[in-house]
């Protein structure tokens, strides 16, 4: 069965879009279980990315140096982005997974027709062995290039609604679900919660030292119910304290760890936070940050912080000031949902119109 073709993409300017979703909460016990044999998808093996429509160049106004975009003919909601060993982007979308082969100028869409458990893919991450992991509302899926394997609560996953994925330096997969944080080492699952109850995880980030950070909403009325920041302490989630004069008013959403160890996070009302050694710095539109809801955040190897906005483009912090890029600078749209930093220093943005890439010096 051939993968569904993704609409032709044309080289354009820079991109954008956004989507914020709420997650439900319910109880679950903390525990560690042995890994049962996973259930392989019932459909026939999926052929890996075959040649798709070529990426063609179209005449557009000159763009700022470094910007390239791939525009979709049809609307597309990009929830998350990951990169394979060749630095090709894989996008988790509301219509399956879209995989690009940039060198070949082609892309392929993988959906339920190809063995994927659900087309609403909320999170995506690529393992050191090259396997693609996808988080959906109906479980966790692994693609080895030919076959999909599905994991759910019967396999050891804490909840079937997966909201975030991240690989640690030691190869452990950390999984955010609507009830708890889960780790998977390849042969064992572990479920990590807060002592006061379940936590509906929004985002997961791993520091260079292996420290696991997560944001989420408490489901049992504990102090982080509005959107807390957690750090893994032993086998449990521990709320992170900071010196904000009004800590109860601080709500964290997306999170990332910078090369210097600082933790950056988006807020619930258009803020961006930087946490270092217990000190919380808040950035708002008054400081030059893009106005409106901030949907995602990423940090490049040089320490630059990039955020995407629901309605007003993208914004970069160079350590001193914020710079906003919009359609006036070449963006396809000012609605951007996701942002991710690639290992080559480029930054990618997922939007309703496709993807955009910023590569300094190109």
Image (cartoon, rainbow, N blue to C red):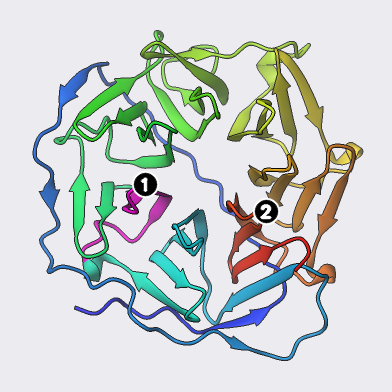
Q: Indicate the position of residue 287 as horizontal and vertical percent values.
A: 90, 37
Q: Is residue 253 above or below residue 127?
A: above
Q: Indicate the position of residue 341 as horizontal and vertical percent values.
A: 61, 50
Span shown in magenta: 115-135
Q: Indicate the position of residue 203 as horizontal and vertical percent values.
A: 50, 35
Quadrant in which residue 3 is drawn: bottom left
Q: Earlier in the sequence, mark 2 or mark 1?
A: 1
Crowd tier of the residue under label 2, counting other residues whose Cα lies within 10 Å: few below 14, some 14–19, many 20 or above: many
Which residue is more in the foreground, 278 or 217? 278
SS label for mark 2: loop
Dividing the image into 4 quarters, which one contains the C terminus? Answer: bottom right
* Residue drawn at the location 42% of the way across and 41% of the way down: 163
Mark 2 to mark 1 CA distance (whole Å) = 29 Å
Q: Indicate the position of residue 234 as horizontal and vertical percent values.
A: 39, 10
Crowd tier of the residue under label 1, counting other residues whose Cα lies within 10 Å: few below 14, some 14–19, many 20 or above: some
* Residue 225 seen: no
Q: Is residue 239 above or below residue 173?
A: above
Q: Which residue is mark 2?
A: 310
* Residue drawn at the location 83% of the way across and 81% of the way down: 62
Quadrant in which residue 95 is drawn: bottom left
Does the segment drawn in magenta span residue 285? Answer: no
Would residue 300 appear left or right of 77 to someone viewing this image?
A: right
SS label for mark 1: loop
Q: Are marks 2 and 1 in contact (CB under 8 Å)?
A: no
* Camera-side mark, 2 or 1: 1
* Residue drawn at the location 23% of the way across and 73% of the way down: 47
Would residue 169 appear left or right of 341 to someone viewing this image?
A: left
| Residue furthest out toward the bottom | 59
Q: Which residue is mark 1?
A: 127
Quadrant in which residue 110 is drawn: bottom left
* Residue 30 seen: yes
């Amino acid at each position: 069965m051939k993968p569904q073709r993704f609409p032709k993409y044309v080289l354009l300017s820079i991109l954008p879009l956004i989507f914020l979703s709420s997650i439900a909460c319910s109880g679950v016990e903390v525990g560690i279980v042995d890994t049962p044999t996973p259930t392989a998808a019932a459909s026939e093996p999926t052929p890996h990315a075959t040649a798709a429509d070529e990426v063609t160049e179209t005449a557009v106004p000159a763009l700022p140096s470094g910007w390239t975009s791939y525009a979709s003919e049809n609307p597309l909601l990009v929830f998350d982005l990951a990169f394979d060993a060749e630095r090709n982007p894989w996008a988790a979308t509301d219509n399956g997974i879209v995989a690009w082969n940039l060198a070949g100028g082609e892309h392929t869409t993988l959906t339920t027709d190809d063995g994927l458990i659900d087309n609403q893919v909320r999170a995506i991450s690529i393992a050191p062995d090259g396997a693609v992991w996808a988080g959906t509302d109906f479980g966790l899926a692994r693609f080895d290039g030919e076959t999909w394997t599905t994991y759910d609560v019967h396999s050891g996953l804490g909840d079937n609604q997966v909201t975030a994925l991240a690989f640690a330096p030691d190869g452990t997969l950390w999984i955010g679900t609507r009830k708890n944080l889960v780790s998977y080492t390849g042969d064992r699952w572990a479920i990590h919660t807060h002592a006061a109850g379940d936590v509906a995880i929004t985002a997961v980030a791993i520091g260079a030292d292996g420290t696991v950070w997560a944001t989420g909403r408490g489901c049992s009325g504990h102090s982080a119910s509005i959107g807390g920041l957690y750090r893994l302490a032993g086998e449990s989630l521990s709320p992170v304290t900071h010196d904000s004069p009004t800590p109860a008013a601080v709500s964290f959403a997306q999170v990332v760890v910078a090369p210097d160890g600082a933790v950056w996070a988006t807020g619930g009302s258009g803020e961006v936070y930087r946490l270092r050694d217990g000190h919380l710095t808040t950035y708002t539109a008054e400081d030059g940050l893009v106005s409106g809801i901030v949907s995602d955040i990423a940090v490049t190897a040089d320490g630059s912080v990039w955020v995407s906005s629901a309605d007003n483009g993208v914004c970069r912090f160079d350590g001193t000031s914020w710079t906003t890029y919009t359609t006036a600078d070449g963006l396809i749209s000012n609605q951007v949902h996701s942002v991710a930093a690639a290992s080559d220093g480029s930054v990618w943005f997922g939007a309703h119109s496709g993807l955009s890439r910023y590569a300094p010096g190109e």
